[in-house]
Amino acid sequence: MAEPLADPAELAASLGVAADDAKLLWALNAASRRFRGAVRHPVSLVNGDTFTLDGHGREAVLLPAAPVLSVSSVTLDGTALTAGTDYDWSADGFLRSLSGCWRETLPCIGGVYDHGYADIPEDIQEVVIDQARALYRIDPGVQTKTVGGQSVTFGVQAAIGVTAQWTDAVERHQLNRGDRP
């Protein structure tokens, strides 16, 4: 299981429970999985990750995750390529052919690279904690709960599942937006 995208102690402080509380850890892991799913990459640092990509007859292809920290090898149909001569890459996740366009073959580009954040950006941590707090406090699917003489109604976030701040953070960190239907 991947590490959560925020510190359990910070969430625990806001909820007034222990950082090792089982429900707190579940909520933090669930919020982290939701964020990773929304942005379509692991976010956390991954060293030595392998990739296999389709060639689309274009000069550049997108690597599966960013930010890219290094690309240690690239192959085209199993033949090793040379950085700076055959290809170049960017931190934003672009892998560019320096000899024209990548072949239009499915799949034909492979390699190994390092990507992600060693220190998770604060905007990601904040929205993950907000989402985890909501998951911790809210019974899924419940809009109104009455116990004795007290009634609780959950707000818009419970109904739609995310805040505007979450949506903004996902947009900032999301990859491969051009392939959405």
Image (cartoon, helix red, strand yellow):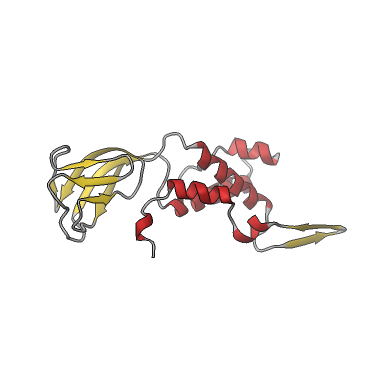
Name the one closer to the observer, 135 or 105: 105
Q: Is residue 26 visible?
A: no
Name the one closer to the observer, 13 or 144: 144
Q: Quadrant of the C terminus?
A: bottom left
Residue 47 location, quadrant:
top left
Name the one closer to the observer, 20 or 151: 151
What residue lies at 65% left-to-right and 63% top-to-bottom?
A: 141
Q: Residue at the bottom extreme? A: 181
Residue 114 location, quadrant:
top left
Q: Is residue 19 left or right of residue 59?
A: right
What residue lies at 52% left-to-right and 37% top-to-bottom?
A: 122
Q: x%, y% of residue 6? A: 53, 40
Q: Relative to 109, does residue 68 appear above or below in the rendering?
A: above
Q: Is residue 168 left or right of residue 49?
A: right
Q: x%, y% of residue 84? A: 16, 37
What residue lies at 25% left-to-right and 41% top-to-bottom?
A: 89
Q: Residue at the top extreme? A: 119
Q: Relative to 97, does residue 55 appear above or below in the rendering?
A: below
Q: In this figure, what is the number of numbered marks?
A: 0
Q: x%, y% of residue 113? A: 28, 41
Q: Relative to 9, does residue 144 appear above or below in the rendering?
A: below
Name the one closer to the observer, 151 or 78: 151
Q: Is residue 107 visible?
A: yes
Q: x%, y% of residue 159? A: 64, 61
Q: Is residue 104 left or right of residue 139?
A: left
Q: Is residue 45 left or right of residue 169?
A: left
Q: Residue at the right extreme? A: 149
